[in-house]
Image (tube, rainbow, N blue to C red):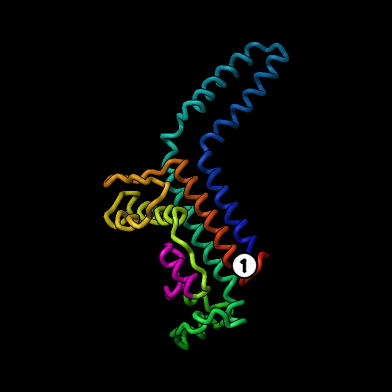
Amino acid sequence: MKNIVANFDREVASVDNLLRFDEMVVAVPIKGLNKISELAEKHNNQRIKEESDKYLRILSNISDNHSLKSYYETIYNQCVVLLVSYFGATLEELFRMCIPIVIQTGEPKNILKEEVKISVQDLAKREFILKDDYIDYLVEKNILSFQDMKNTRRTFEKYLDVILDKNQIMNNIIFGQASRHIIVHSGGRITSKFKGQIEVATPRTIMPEMKETGLLKYNPEEVKILGDSMKSFMQTLKGELNKYCDDF
């Protein structure tokens, strides 16, 4: 289980790097030009030093003034989409890890009491094996869902007796998940449905004061808060699930 959570942490770190990609793009030639300038000075090549210093000043100004930000800021919303996708996939992976143990021990009993209607055709198509395909089928039929915190809390509480408290960290995640939906489906345009979804997400530290209309635009700091909130949530969940899987 710790490997699953560690992998999620690496995915969040990759998003953090993406947030700084514009800085990294400029940093590489700056480093190279600094080296050229030093070598030109060492070998008394004034012309090359002057040329390298000229472009070094240009790139340094771009870096210091964040001149590429306006061209790059659309990626910040896409970073939210990535985080929410990684988060949902990791939740499902953790849940799946615990289910074979629950089936084996018979505790807690709720998931074993779940009634599933499946056709003979589906059985034949899947070559259905309970321990391998049971969760796939429940997810496919929308009995289990990890796409939003309401369903996530219900799933873990009902089937694994894990109570996930609603707090500021969870509210940040709720806001991020609702954000992902409008970024993907309405180009980031704030909708009445979105405003209804985030009413319950208080208190939070991501955009606590929301504008009523227009486009939702994340900045790097807000994306970082969302990623950190998700990492903190995963650590809490891992601690709760250790009773099933131990910390391996």
**Which residue is at 54% across, 20% downward?**
57
Q: Going by the picture, which residue comes out furthest to the bottom?
A: 120
- Considering only vertical position in the picture, is 106 above or below 98? below
- Crowdedness of circle 1 by 10 Å Cα count: few (<14), some, many (20+)? some
Q: Per the image, is 108 magenta?
A: no
**Which residue is at 42% across, 55% downward?**
171
Q: What element carries label 1?
A: helix
Left or right of 23 on screen, residue 202: left
Q: Per the image, is 143 magenta?
A: yes
Q: Position of residue 146 (x, y in %)?
A: 46, 65
The span picked out in magenta is: 139-158
Check disc 1 and report the residue beneath it: 242
Q: Where is residue 202 in the image (x, y as percent from the top left)?
A: 37, 53
**Which residue is at 73% across, 14% downward?**
43
Q: Which amino acid does label 1 sit on?
A: Asn
**Which residue is at 27% across, 47% downward?**
212
